[in-house]
Amino acid sequence: MATKELIWEKVANTKEELVFAENNIAVTELNGKKICIGIFNNEMFAFGYSCPHAGGILANGNFDSLGNIVCPIHRFKFCAHNGRNLSGEGYYLQHWPVAIKKDGIFIGIEKSKTWFPWF
Ligand code: FES
């Protein structure tokens, strides 16, 4: 399988710059669009701001005990690692790799998708 070429976009200078709510989810912007950054078990995940089912605001959701993202509206669950809808409804949550570097926190976007088709 070919490796996808990524472009790394900086979303924060430090982790402290992101404002995490009690649910360990922060909202930031990626090229002017809101996305969520979540932390579970000291791992950082980047995923869409809106639920692919009916637009629930995932920043108001939570991680379950296994680290899945749970939408606050109809409680569908999404794998934080691959975006798959784990509760079986067939939806897919946009997500991106996160890199924490000396000079900031970066989100990896596939080069072929830099026109942000998920919004
Ligand atoms: S809007 Fe998220 S599960 Fe329905």
Image: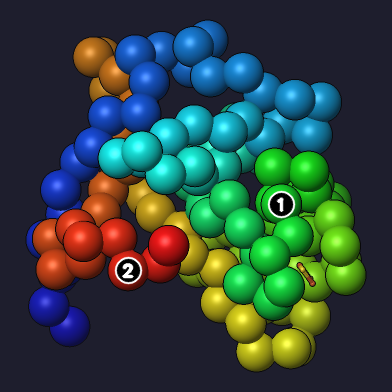
Residue at point 54%, 38% (across, down): 37
* Quarter of the rendering containing residue 39: top right
**SS category of the residue bearing label 2:** loop
Query: Which of these two is toward me, 111 or 3?
Result: 111
Q: Is residue 38 above or below residue 68?
A: above
Which image quarter holds the N terminus?
Answer: bottom left
Q: Is residue 10 above or below residue 43?
A: above
Contact between marks 2 and 1 (CB within 8 A): the answer is no
Tag 2: amino acid: Pro
Pinpoint residue 70: horizontal percent, then vertical percent. Answer: 78, 59
Answer yes or no: is residue 34 visible: yes
Tag 1: amino acid: Ile
Q: Residues within 10 Å of mark 1 (few under 14, many from 20)?
A: some
Of the two numbered discs 2 and 1 on the same chain, state the one appearing first in sequence: 1
Q: Residues within 10 Å of mark 2 (few under 14, many from 20)?
A: few
Q: What residue did someone put label 2 on?
A: 117
Number of numbered discs on residues: 2
Pinpoint residue 104: horizontal percent, then vertical percent. Answer: 30, 19
Q: What residue did someone put label 1 on?
A: 57
Residue at point 23%, 14% (across, down): 103
Q: How is the image coloured?
A: rainbow
